[in-house]
Amino acid sequence: MKLKKALIVGIVSALLILVTACAPSYTIVEATQEVTEADVTAAEVEESMPEEAEAAEVEEVEAEESMPEEAEAEEVEAQDEPAAPVDVTNPRVDEVMHEVTLVQHSYNPDTGVTSFTCASSGQGLSGVAPDPEGPRFVGANSRDFDLRGTVGLFRVDPDGTISFVPQETGSYFLDPDGTKHESLTLEQALGYFASGDAIWLGEHGDPGRIQACDPTFGEQPAEEAEAAEAEEVVEDEPTAPVDMTNPNVDEVMNAVTLVQHNYDPDIGVTSFTCASSGQGLNGVEPDPEGPRFVGPNSRDFDLRGTVGLFRVDPDGTISFVPQQTGSYFLDPDGIKHTSLTLEQALGYFASGDAVWLGEHGDPGRIQACDPKAG
């Protein structure tokens, strides 16, 4: 009996030991299963994330691809609007394209002299042939083309492209809204001529820069010729004595450096020679061979907007004449003068109506002629 009890107790104890030993293993298995499930869940999340990231990248790429199109659209909107078609039947447009006599401007930077050659004899821009060697800059033979106060030239490139540019380097055309243009297309320029913003300041028949280039020169109606003769017959009233101590008068007579203008009508070029080295008109010697036309070495003499030269005849008589052939000096009361006596001219310098636009020491046309230059 005792042996049987002991056996039972031993079996029970063994069972308890076995249960105790198996319990942790069961817990570890459960924990392992939980970890494995967590790993599976994380893996599923990681597998789903690349798809979302890829979708986001696709959206970014699509956005980047669409941005250039939007930028390009903005750039196109910022460009100038195409110029409206020009009415080629407009009289001013037709005049520029088919009638105005044009001369080519050729500037020599070494001498500072602009020479002219005939570019279109009464045929306007349509008569200007492109030069394969380089651009041609052409303007009116008679006076200038003007756009809101800026003188312009037409640039004809070797390929035939024509544009409108300011005559003076560094200048520009100014719009009413303040926009500056260094160049205009032919269509834009003709549009301004059609509207009257751009104008030709000259006239047909004016000898201008090259008299032989204008086929209409000399076609003056009889009535106008008679009127011109009548104007020339009218004699001016005697002038009052000039105050020779006036600083402006003294400068012209004794201080300004003067150069002689030598115009060659065959080639349309004006050359210069020194006429008075810092001694004004008193330093100019008459030439027995013919008249000498002299002006300042530095810039010009100006009387109410007209550039003038002093004419020194072989007998020593001095008069003041417009530099441009066919031009005139205009009085405030509308009287035109093709020539003024020395006394009249000096009177205008004394009053300030006539001015010297240059300055002493400016190298001007002939630097060596001015003792103050350099």
Image (spheres, rainbow, N blue to C red):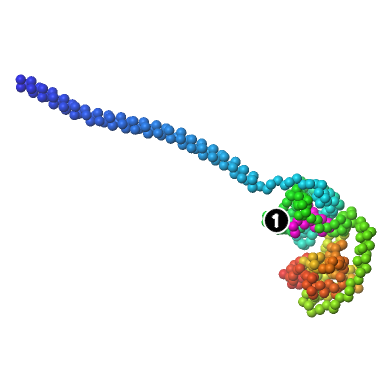
Is residue 63 positioned above or below 93 on the image?
above
Give whichever of 372, 227 is nearer the camera. Answer: 227
Occupied quadrant, residue 214: bottom right
Q: Position of residue 262 (x, y in %)?
A: 85, 64
Occupied quadrant, residue 370: bottom right
- Residue 320 seen in render: yes
Residue ID at (89%, 53%): 215
Residue ID at (74%, 68%): 362
Give whichever of 84, 28 is nearer the camera. Answer: 84
**Label 1: few (<14), some or many (≥20) within 10 Å?**
few
Q: Would you say residue 140 sits in the magenta stretch?
A: yes
- Residue 268 seen in render: no
Looking at the rendering, the stretch of residues picked out in magenta corresponds to 135-149
Is residue 197 positioned above or below 287 on the image?
above
Q: Position of residue 236 (x, y in %)?
A: 89, 72
Q: Position of residue 77 (x, y in %)?
A: 64, 45
Q: Would you say residue 254 sits in the magenta stretch?
A: no
Residue ID at (84%, 66%): 334
Q: Quadrant of the N terminus?
A: top left
Farthest front residue in view: 333
Residue tagged 1? 176
Q: Which amino acid, mark 1?
A: Pro
Secondary element under disc 1, as helix, strand or loop, is: loop
Q: Quadrant of the C terminus?
A: bottom right
Residue ID at (22%, 29%): 23
Occupied quadrant, residue 179: bottom right
Is residue 360 positioned above or below 78 on the image?
below
Q: Position of residue 198 (x, y in %)?
A: 77, 54
